[in-house]
Image: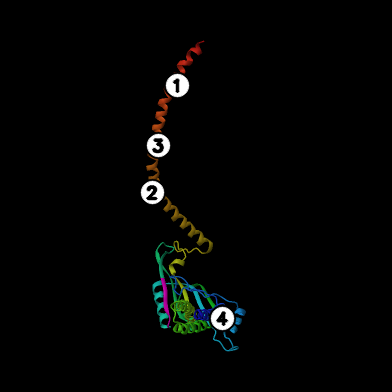
Amino acid sequence: MKRILFITLVAAFVLSACGAAATAAPDVYYDFAMPAGGAPMEAPAMPESVAQDSSRSSTGNVEGAAIDRLVIKNADLSIVVADVEARMQAIQSMAEEMGGRLVSSNVSQTFANNGAKVPQAVMVIRVPSEKLDEALKEIKAGVVEVQYETISSQDVTAEYVDLQSRLKNLEAAETQLARILEEAQNTEDVLNVFNQLTSIREQIEVVKGQIKYYEESAALSAVSVQVIAEETIQPIEIAGWKPQGVAREAIQDLIYFSQDFVDFLIRFVLYTLPTLILIGIPLYLAFLGVRAVYRRTRKPQAATTQTVEKPKAKK
């Protein structure tokens, strides 16, 4: 009984130390898989003042020690090119040459103003963060147009330091529980300590995953690139005339309306009208039958009424 009480008190002390460290950093779980065709997930933001305070508290007695800032940089841009497939291959090769990689690539079909099908792509690459500016210059080199470009930066130093501190406390708790497990002789004591040790090890794996996410995100910047074919932005040309501005938009709207109206007529003639005919003919025949029966039953009644009323008319 004394052994069980001793083990319980030691385990409670170890877990309370881990709980105090856990309050320094929120227990957030991150999905490290990159969604297809989408931008990478960003770490939660923290105000600058809170980040500084958290950095000081997490370093323990080592106050004023220099800490390398951990910054996550991402970029998002849209470019118009003459050859979509060639540009995609060039971007992928550039990322690999810089020590990065292709994360995802999605190619779809769209329509140009003349009705022709043209490819359109969205791809996500990762490049070393120190080479982000160089990569963006390479991506924009020789393009027809850059429609938009966004660069985001996020300092996650405070969160990273807190995770490191939490990992240290969890590993210390793991060591203490492992020693207690070696000395335990009672089966109940062994199971109790083993369950607590398993829980600690699970928390260690989660924290390590969070730390790895921050390190990889800071080391390799994510760049999301939308690649648009030049044909989709070409102005409409009618007998050598290229309307611009409002006139161009009005003509495009008219063309789109005409296409939709023709599609409606085709669908109405080939589908809607035959369906209405197939449904309407039986209904019309049924209506004629009901009307004929009604007229036949009404004529004898009218003749009887006239026969009864004729003597009254003579008087």
* Sequence-first disc among 4 and 2: 4
Which residue sits at x=42%, y=50%? 265
Discs 1, 3 touching: Cβ within 8 Å: no
Q: Amino acid at mark 1?
A: Ala
Count neighbours of disc 1 (C-alpha within 10 A) and say few if under 14, some if 14 to 19, many if 20 or more: few
* Front one among 23 and 70: 23
Tell me where residue 100 sits by quadrant. Answer: bottom left
Mark 1, residue position = 302
* Sequence-first disc among 1 and 3: 3
Mark 4, residue position = 158
* Front one among 24 and 150: 24
| Residue 195 x, y percent position in the rendering | 46, 76
Q: Nearer the viewer, mark 3 or mark 4?
A: 4
Estimate the spatial distance between the alpha carbons at disc 1 and disc 3, rounded to whole Å: 27 Å
> Which mark is on residue 284?
3
* Sequence-first disc among 3 and 2: 2
* Sequence-first disc among 3 and 4: 4
Estimate the spatial distance between the alpha carbons at disc 1 and disc 2, rounded to whole Å: 46 Å
